[in-house]
Image (cartoon, rainbow, N blue to C red):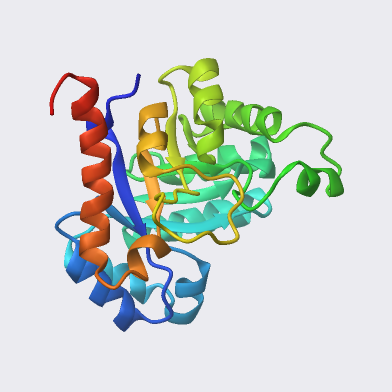
Amino acid sequence: MHSLTKTKIVVALDVHTLHDAVRIVEILRSEADAFKVGPQLFVREGPEIVRRLKAIGVQVFLDLKFHDIPNTVAQAVALACSLGADLITVHLCGGADMLEAAAQSVKGTSTLLVGVSVLTSCDANTLAVTGVSSTVEEQVLRLAGLAVQYLGGGVVASPLEILPLRNFFGNSLQIVTPGIRPTWALGDDQKRTLSPLQAAQLGANWLVIGRPITTASSPLEALLRIKKEITTGFVSKTGGC
């Protein structure tokens, strides 16, 4: 069983402006382990959003999911590293040459390069229309093998694939898990989800949680509620109250 005390929380900044992002970060910085900048925010604000968050002193997960020819991805990853990004994503389906080139760009840095397997909005039908006949689990395990071979074992996967990944690869993976929805949060476009406690118990290293926190009437209370849920689950399993 994974140690829940080692599970970190990344708050996804699913907001429109640098001002909104900074406001949330200032509120949550003492309790969150990192903050995720995705395409929506990056396209609007550009590299300045990463610089600003690093100046505040927080860890930044730059989730742009690079997928292109090897040289282009290598250059993009190198530039993301130069901004100070602590975690960077690439698509594992880009293949061995692309992943190897990306890995070279983070060599000698502290940046964690993680590979995206199958998006949490996808299911077997989504894969089928793109010509993939495998089940979601089979495809995730196949792609995770590339993450182990070329990226040092960082993989992004839905919470439903955590247990198969742990069973197959043991502790050789750093598993970053989106699709985290507290039982009290509203549903959305993500299909393969679990609660924070369930994902932590299964062995996720990083939980990526956005809207249940950022759209709450009190983002800090929402984050603290999630952390308490995880901690309480851990304590109860060790005989505590």
Drawn side of residue 132 relative to residue 229, left or right: right
Pick the quarter of the image with the C terminus. Answer: top left
- Whether 241 is drawn above or below 157: the answer is above
Is residue 210 visible in the rendered structure shown here?
Answer: yes
**Which residue is at 41% across, 49% downward?**
183
Judge whether residue 32 can be spotted in this image.
no
Q: Quadrant of residue 223?
A: bottom left
Query: Percent x, y for residue 203?
Result: 39, 28
146 or 171, nearer to the observer: 171
**Could you say which is closer to the camera, residue 102 or residue 32?**
32
Please name the residue shown 63% across and 53% down the image: 121
Name the residue nearer the viewer: 2 or 62. Answer: 2
- Please state the horizontal and vertical placement of residue 114, each as a whole percent of the image: 48, 42
Compare residues 206 and 163 and report the one nearer the observer: 163
Can you say whether 123 is above or below 185 in the image? above
Residue 238 location (% of width, % of height)? 19, 19
For image coordinates 43% across by 80% down, the residue present is: 16
